[in-house]
Amino acid sequence: MAAVLGRDEQGQLIRKAGVMGIVLVEGEVRPGDIIRVELPPEPHRPLERV
């Protein structure tokens, strides 16, 4: 867990990992499958903890 947690200059906790996405088709993902990633429009903002 320590590998994905850190602290900023003010001592606030920084989470360095997380996943958020929208799945359009269900099913297994197998080696060789094509996966498309689209970033949202800027400005990008850090996600809040849920």
Image (spheres, helix red, strand yellow):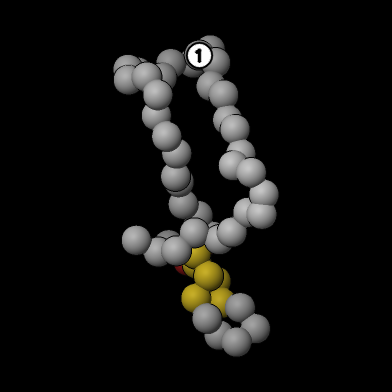
Q: Which residue sits furthest top? A: 32
Q: In the picture provided, is 11 more to the left or to the right than 21?
A: right
Q: Residue at x 59, y 32 (%)?
A: 38
Residue 13 x %, y %: 49, 76
Residue 39 in percent (x, y) is at 61, 39
Left or right side of 8 for 20: left
Furthest toward the bottom, the residue is: 10
Residue 28 vs residue 2, the one in the foreground: 28
Amino acid marked by disc 1? Asp
Q: Secondary structure at mark 1?
A: loop
Residue 41 shows in the view: yes
Is residue 4 something that shows in the picture?
Answer: no
- Kindly indicate the quadrant of the structure image that contains residue 41: top right
Residue at 32% x, 17% y: name it. 27
Residue 11 rendering spot, x and y as whole percentages: 55, 85
Compared with 29, 47 (above or below) is: below
User: Residue 31 placed where, x, y %?
Assistant: 49, 16
Pick the quarter of the image with the C terminus.
bottom left
**What residue is drawn where x is 65% and y is 83%?**
9
Mark 1 lies on residue: 33
Residue in the foreground of this view, choosing between 8 and 22: 22
Q: Nearer the viewer, residue 50 or 28?
A: 50
Q: Quadrant of the N terminus?
A: bottom left
Q: Residue at x 40, y 24 (%)?
A: 24
Please determine whether, in this image, residue 15 is positioned above or below residue 32. Answer: below
